[in-house]
Image (spheres, rainbow, N blue to C red):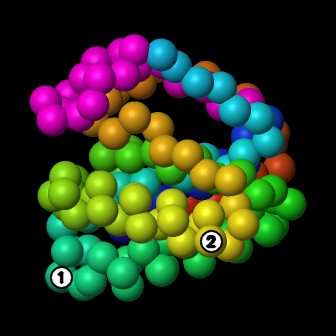
Amino acid sequence: MKVLVMYVDEFGYSPAIKNLESAEEVTEGKKYTDSIVAFIQVEESDEEKTVTSREKKLVNHLKWTARKNNCKKVILHSFAHLSDSKASVEFTKELFDKAEIRLQNAEFTTTQTPFGYFLDLEIKAPGYSLARIWATL
């Protein structure tokens, strides 16, 4: 799994192109402030392990990043452009859903960007070291 995490002052999206036929219809965008945005690519090799083990690894990384940025809001964004390898849609979505629940149980405010869409993004992010963290998990 590859993860690019950014602390953002502002983050917004609007749906541009639906690229997964089974995805629910989304027509409205949303905006957030003072958040951690996690651009996540789940890879094929992740499916060799359990969803729970991958979810735990991801959540631990996101919680660490959030603490470093004094932030309690996390946005999960499927971003299949960090690697050539891609996990199945089903595995990826299950991982995202379980990670969101685990974060909420740890008293984080969470959301997911619309799964199965290319999105127009607006990002305003400060320029300091721990505001952008890339990892292979």
Q: Earlier in the sequence, mark 1 or mark 2?
A: 1
Left or right side of 60 for 8 = right
The part of the chain drawn in magenta is: 10-27
**Vertical comparison of 114 with 106: above or below:** above
Q: Secondary structure at mark 1?
A: helix
Say which of 60 and 45 sits in front.
60
Say which of 40 and 126 sits in front.
40
**Residue 135 appears in view:** no
Q: Which mark is residue 60?
A: none
Q: Residue furthest right?
A: 70
Residue 96 in picture, x, y percent from top left: 40, 59
Residue at 86 percent of width and 60 percent of height: 70
Task: Say which amino acid is labelled 1.
Answer: Glu
Query: How many C-alpha atoms fall within 10 Å of the one at disc 1: few (<14), some, or many (≥20)?
Result: few
Query: Is residue 22 rendered magenta in the image?
Result: yes
Residue 27 in picture, x, y percent from top left: 40, 15
- Where is the C terminus found, in terms of image quarters? bottom left
Residue 48 in picture, x, y percent from top left: 18, 82
Dot 1 corresponds to which residue?
48
Dot 2 corresponds to which residue?
105
Query: How many C-alpha atoms fall within 10 Å of the one at disc 2: few (<14), some, or many (≥20)?
Result: few
- In which quadrant of the rendered view does residue 18 lie? top left
**Vertical comparison of 34 with 56: above or below:** above
Q: Secondary structure at mark 2?
A: helix
CA–CA distance in space, label 1 to label 2: 26 Å
Residue at 29 percent of width and 23 percent of height: 25
**Residue 92 appears in view:** yes
Residue 106 in picture, x, y percent from top left: 68, 73
Query: Is residue 136 rendered magenta in the image?
Result: no
**Vertical comparison of 104 with 40: above or below:** below
